[in-house]
Image: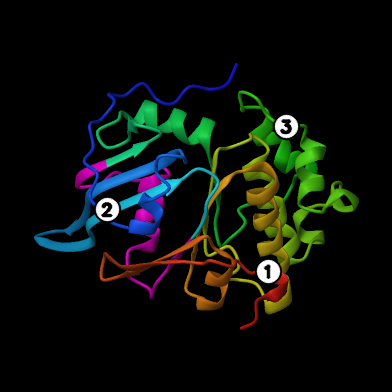
Amino acid sequence: MAPQPPETPTPTVPEPGIDARAAAHSDTREIVFRARGLRKVYRMGEVEVPALREIDLDIFGGEFIVLLGPSGSGKSTLLNILGGLDVPTSGEVAYCEHRLDGASETALTRFRREHVGFVFQFYNLIPSLTVRENVQLVSDIAEDPMPVDEAIDLVGLTPRRDHFPAQLSGGEQQRVAIARAIVKRPAVLLCDEPTGALDYQTGKLVLEVIERINRELGTTAVVITHNAAIAGMADRVIHLGDGRIQRIDVNAHKLRPSQLSW
C-alpha cells in the first residue's frame, strides 16, 4: 500500500497570481508543494536575521525546478522547509494539501522518510560500507523500496557496487548518494548544490543522473545552484535574492545536461 502523507490538517489556501504561466496549468497538474506568505527569521540573541520574506510558490508534480541565487538569498532555507528539515517562522507550506507548518516532529520525520530524498553537496557515505551496503541502509527502513541493485543501476554504478567510498571518485560518490536518496521511491528529490564540489565533466554526469530520475520516474526535482548555466535544464527557474522570489522563468525548450556549458 502506498505511504500516506503526515496526518495534519488540510489547509484552505488562497490562489494569488504568482506565476501566470504556471497557474494556467494548475487545473491539470498536481500541486506537490504550496507556500503562501512564507517567512523565516533566525534569531541570534536580540538580533533577527530574515532568511525568507513572504514567499508565495507552487511546485507541480514531475517538475524540474532550479533555485538560483547568490549565497544568503534563502535557497537552502526554502529547500529545508520544503523537505521538513526546518519550519517557517510564519506563513503556510503544504505538501499535497497536508500542512507542514505546525506539524509535529513525528509527522515531519514520517514525511521525510516516506516522501523526500535528499542530496547534498557532500556525500555523507559510511566509509566502512560498500556502495550496495550504503544504499541498503535506506532500503531497510523504507515502506516500499525499489530493489537496491535497480537504484544502483539507475545511477550507472553497477560495476562499482562492491567498492568502498574511498575507492570511488567524487562524482561516483555523489551518484551513490543519489541512489541512496531514490531507493525509497520518493515523490520529491531535493538537491542542495549537488555539483558544488565536482569538476565540470563530473558535475554534468551527476546532472544527467538527476535529469534521468526526473524524466523516467516522474520524480519532482528541486535543485539549488549558484551556477546559472544549470538553469537551462529546468522546467522553471526560481530566482531568489534577499529572501524573496525576484522572478520565475519558464524554459520553453529544456536543455539536456550534455548541452550545458560553463
For mark 3, what is the residue?
A: 146
Placement of the C terminus among the 4 image quadrants: bottom right
Horizontal relation, residue 185 to residue 53: left or right: right
Res. 257 mark = 1
Mark with earlier residue (2, 1): 2
Of tags 3 and 1, which is closer to the observer? 1
Q: Which residue has dot 2 on it? A: 56
Distance from Cα at disc 3 to Cα at disc 1: 25 Å
User: What's the magenta region?
Assistant: 66-92
Work out how far the residue at label 3 is from the one at label 2, CA to CA, in angstroms: 34 Å
Which residue is pictured at 43% across the width and 40% down the height? 32
Question: What crowding class fits label 1: few (fewer than 14 Cα within 10 Å), some (14-19), or many (20 or more)?
Answer: many
Vertical order, 84 against 9 (above or below): below
> Who comes first in sequence, dot 3 or dot 2?
2
Amino acid type shown at disc 1: Pro
Q: Is residue 81 above or below residue 174?
A: above
